[in-house]
Image: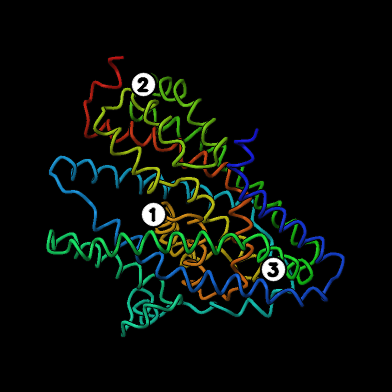
């Protein structure tokens, strides 16, 4: 019990702040606007820290990739499997939201719904992916362009080899420093989010709780369905009926570990043991499971779409247009990759889609709240999806008989 409380302490404190803020919003009404600056300070700290954090995380990760012909083949198939499952999870969530749409909260959001409503023109697409000046990369409004630039820096460092040794160390050090900065800022989360949620409850009224409850119902329903049905389909593709039996027989401990710790990283040891028992080769297990804990996030894919849907509903915007859906899929893929190497990385993903859609800072608190509520089941998908992904990768690049000889 003590370990469970320790592992979930961050969520517990956040929820405590949100609950206290909600009660204050109900009791005191519009007068709680006096605490809104506290929430603004918290959000501003996040916005300032996120750009260098993401830059160093991405650039240092790419710069430290090891090369090798066989490794390149495994990484290629692994990337395809990771990308495919993340997109499938996102599309399933979008379909669920079409079947059970989130209703717009109402007139209270009209003043905010003007942000980001224009269609993307050719110039806007150019500005989305690039900037004309280096200093513009430092703005959160150009976060996607900064991510692309960070990838280029990472690959440039990788190509430079030993000549870039000092610069590689600089990237690694910067990555670690800003991870710690982000951890320090997030310690203010319960206070900052509590203040902001008090303001939101006073602004939107009781309908806000119905919106969150609806989104949670869709999120948990989709996640459990994906866990039970799609993981079985993936296991069948990898090894037929035998693959399904091996997957679920050996997935009990990783599932319990994921839910108990609420951490994909903490589930790595259980996943390594489970993957071997599932018949996955040692080399694929050793590569896929650790990288999957960082880069493969089916649960985060579901969570990302849910966050966008609830933010759009609160801001009086439709989540049904083709342009919005395509951008949502791109953001989901980036979120699933970026957040793995960053403490509280889901918040970075939220900042990314808020930047891309041109939404104001007020969009961040509801996205964080949805992410917090969905986190246990999202972690279950994130962690246990790595072993079934390893089975699929082994199917295409490993020992073809490995899933049928045990």
Judge by depth and name the residue closer to the eye, 187 or 315: 187
Pointers 3 and 1 in contact (CB under 8 A)?
A: no
Which residue matches tag 3? Answer: 196
Residue at 14%, 45% in the rendered image: 68
Quarter of the view holding residue 148? bottom left
Residue at 38%, 19% in the rendered image: 242
Residue 86 picture location, percent across and down: 42, 48
Which residue matches tag 1? Answer: 337
Residue at 22%, 40% in the rendered image: 74
Label 1 or label 2, whichever comes before in sequence order: 2
Cα distance in 3D space between marks 3 and 2: 48 Å
Cα distance in 3D space between marks 1 and 2: 27 Å
Quarter of the view holding residue 25? bottom right
Pointers 1 and 2 in contact (CB under 8 A)?
A: no
Q: Residue furthest top?
A: 406
Mark 1 is surrounded, within 10 Å at the Cα level, by few (under 14), some (14 to 19) or many (20 or more) other residues, namely many
Q: Is residue 163 left or right of residue 216?
A: left
Label 3 or label 1, whichever comes before in sequence order: 3
* Residue 104 to residue 289: above or below: below
* Residue 117 to residue 394: above or below: below
Q: Residue furthest bottom?
A: 133
Which residue matches tag 2? Answer: 277
Colour basis = rainbow
Q: Of the residues tagged 3 and 1, which is closer to the observer? A: 3
**Considering the image in quadrants, where does the N terminus appear?**
top right
Cα distance in 3D space between marks 3 and 1: 28 Å
- Dot 2: what SS? helix
- Dot 3: what SS? helix
Residue 55 picture location, percent across and down: 35, 66
**Considering the image in quadrants, where does the C terminus appear?**
top left
């Amino acid at each position: 019990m003590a370990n469970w409380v320790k592992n979930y302490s961050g969520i517990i404190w956040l929820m405590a702040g949100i609950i206290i803020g909600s009660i204050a919003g109900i009791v005191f009404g519009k007068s709680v606007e006096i605490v809104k600056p506290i929430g603004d300070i918290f959000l501003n700290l996040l916005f300032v820290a996120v750009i260098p954090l993401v830059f160093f995380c991405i650039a240092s990760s790419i710069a430290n990739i090891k090369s090798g012909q066989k490794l390149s083949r495994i990484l290629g198939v692994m990337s395809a499997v990771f990308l495919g499952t993340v997109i499938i999870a996102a599309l399933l969530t979008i379909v669920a939201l079409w079947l059970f749409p989130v209703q717009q909260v109402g007139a209270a959001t009209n003043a905010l719904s003007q942000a980001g409503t224009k269609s993307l023109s050719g110039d806007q697409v150019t500005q989305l992916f690039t900037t004309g000046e280096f200093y513009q990369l430092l703005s959160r409004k150009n976060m996607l362009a900064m991510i692309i630039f960070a990838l280029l820096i990472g690959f440039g460092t990788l190509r430079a080899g030993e000549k870039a040794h000092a610069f590689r160390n600089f990237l690694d050090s910067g990555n670690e420093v800003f991870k710690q900065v982000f951890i320090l800022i997030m310690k203010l989360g319960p206070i900052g989010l509590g203040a902001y949620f008090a303001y939101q409850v006073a602004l939107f009224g009781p309908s806000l709780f119905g919106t969150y409850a609806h989104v949670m119902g869709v999120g948990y329903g989709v996640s459990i369905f994906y866990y039970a049905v799609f993981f079985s389909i993936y296991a069948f593709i990898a090894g037929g009926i035998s693959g399904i039996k091996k997957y679920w027989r050996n997935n009990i401990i990783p599932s319990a570990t994921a839910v108990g710790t609420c951490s994909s990283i903490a589930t790595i040891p259980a996943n390594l043991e489970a993957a071997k028992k599932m018949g996955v080769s040692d080399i694929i297990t050793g590569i896929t499971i650790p990288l999957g804990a960082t880069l493969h996030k089916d649960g985060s894919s579901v969570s990302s779409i849910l966050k966008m849907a609830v933010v759009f509903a609160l801001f009086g915007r439709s989540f049904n247009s083709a342009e919005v859906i395509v951008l949502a899929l791109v953001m989901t893929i980036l979120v699933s990759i970026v957040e793995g190497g960053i403490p509280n990385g889901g918040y970075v993903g939220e900042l990314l889609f808020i930047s891309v859609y041109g939404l104001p800072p007020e969009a961040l608190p509801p996205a964080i709240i949805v992410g917090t509520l969905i986190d246990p089941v999202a972690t279950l998908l994130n962690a246990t999806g790595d072993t079934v992904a390893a089975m699929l990768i082994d199917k295409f690049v490993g020992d073809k008989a490995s899933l049928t000889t045990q």
